[in-house]
Amino acid sequence: MNDNVLKFTALSGTISVTENLYVYETKNDMLVVDCGVGFPDLEMPGIELVLPDFSYIVKNKAKLRGIVLSQGHEDHIGAVPYLLQEVSVPVWGAPLTVEFLQEKFRDFKISKTDLRTFHPERDEFEVGSFKVSPFRVTHSLPDACGFAIDTPAGRIFHVPEHKMNQDPVDGMPFDIARAKKLAGEKENLFLASDCLGANKPGFTESEQDIEKNMLAIVQKAKQAVFTTAISSNIGRFQQMVNVAQKTGRKVIFVGRSIITKTQKAHKLGYLKYLPGSVIQLRDAQQYGPHQLMYVVSGCYGQEGSSLYRLSTGEYDGMETAEGDMMVFSANPAPPHTKESQNSMVDDLIDRGVDVHYHEVDEGLYVSGHGKQEDIKALFNIVKPKYFIPIGGEIRYMHAYEKLVLAEGHSKDQVFKLKPGDNITFEGDKVTKGQRIHIKSVLVHGRGIGDIGKVVLGDRSVLGTEGVVVIIFKVDKNKKLVENPQIVTRGFVYQGKSRNLLNDATARLASFVKAKNTKNIKALKDDITRFLENHFYKVTARKPMILPVVVEV
């Protein structure tokens, strides 16, 4: 690289709405913007989190000067503790983001960190050869930011999520004046910005009406009220608190993630409530059900979450009763969340709970992402030479490109990057580089990255087809001592399939005697192929075959 070259790499976060991780790189310096987690899909049984692939960053860690975070949602900060196990650099964030991150560091027992707070309405700071000027944007939690970043190749704007709403619940609107000032100081090389709402016309609605709609619903409740939203949606929790206070109810936050985040927000003054209006779960018995509002974590029906256990009657110390009310203020937009939320809704309704959820469409949810007019308004503020859609899927990037074209720009001014794609800017020359090979890093328990396609494939087979274990006893000459034993799990019910298994045992014994091989590995391979074919012919199923050969 020459001194005036900038390389931008989207390591992840461009074909999904999670795992945001972007890299800015010059000859001597590297800056990372956001470092978030993803969530497992239906083909990842047992997986708890999906991490971005840090390999490229770790390989070039001698150049890494810092990590800058745009907001406090998990898909922007959740992977930071994992990356800091590989590198040691300063991390910058706005006040609420830093508070959320400090709690994560405590969970990970990370004590030595260089965590720095910036204030988006006034601060500027340098990260190596990059100068970063944050500005406040409207999103679904306080202290969400966009960035103007000065690089050797020019000024760029990085705005991961935004909407132009000037009347947000948290009282922190998009700082249009500061954004315009930063945009007007120089020619702007490119804008990397949120594309998730690019296929929806108009502006994203204000969240102010949610409180009015929620109040009208809660006023009809005769017994306990349960509510839920994503655990970092502080503005929504403020509305729930307001509704509880207007209806004479005490608020109980339930679930570690919600309790922690609301405490942090209250500490900073971002969540306000009257003294005594929020109580502990253990104190609920002192009040009648009609005096309580529970705010419970687990809005997407995550297995093991507080709301999941409440819906299944497994939460110790909290339960629903017939006639209670449940209010969902969360749209199951993330992949694979609709099914789990719907299942939880059904369980609650079956228990006699009056459930208000996304399909009823009562005005209880507004997206934190801008629609077409929000996106175009940002285009007109920044007026960049090039455009890079981020934070969405392929169809949203395509819709974003159409917006750029509709604004009079050309197709060669838009770069739709897939994970690992990168663009190099040098003067008037723009070059798309060779894609960096990346993979998904899966987390299960304490294991990080030790599960790949082979293990997931095995889990899928075990979960859908079951397993058959065959135990062989052979003598020192590798001769079969007695008929093999077959044990199955998840394939057939052994008690009712004894004839099937006895027939397979007899056929297998004859096959092994006829093969007369002394090579144990070859014997296991032959057994596996034989039983795979036999069971498929008889049952049309393909269980996992595990032969065990024991010398006696």
Image (tube, helix red, strand yellow):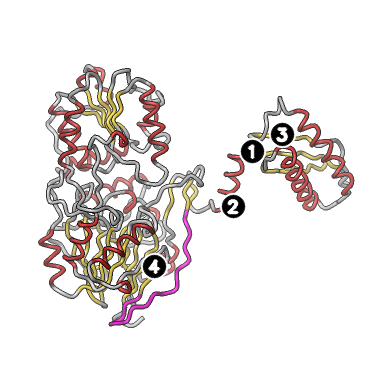
The quarter of the image holding the N terminus is bottom left
Which mark, residue 307? none
Q: Earlier in the sequence, mark 4 or mark 2?
A: 4
Classify mark 3: helix, strand or loop: strand
Q: Is residue 510 above or below residue 36?
A: above
Residue that mark 1 sits on: 466
**Which residue position is annotated with label 2?**
454
Q: x, y percentage for residue 547?
A: 74, 43
Please tell me which of labels 3 and 4 falls first in the chain: 4
Circles 4 and 2: CB distance less than 8 Å? no
Residue depicted at 18% across the width and 61% down the height: 377
* CA–CA distance in space, label 3 to label 2: 23 Å
Q: Residues within 10 Å of mark 1 (few under 14, many from 20)?
A: many
**Disc 1 residue type (three-letter):** Gly
Residue occupying image coordinates x 27% and y 28%:
226
Question: Could you give the CA–CA distance between mark 4 and mark 1, rounded to whole angstroms?
Answer: 44 Å
- Crowd class of label 4 (few under 14; some 14 to 19; many from 20; radius 10 Å): some
Q: Inspect this view and state whether residue 259 appears.
A: no
| Tag shown at residue 487 | 3
Q: Give the number of the mark in front: 4 or 2.
A: 2
Region in magenta: 424-441
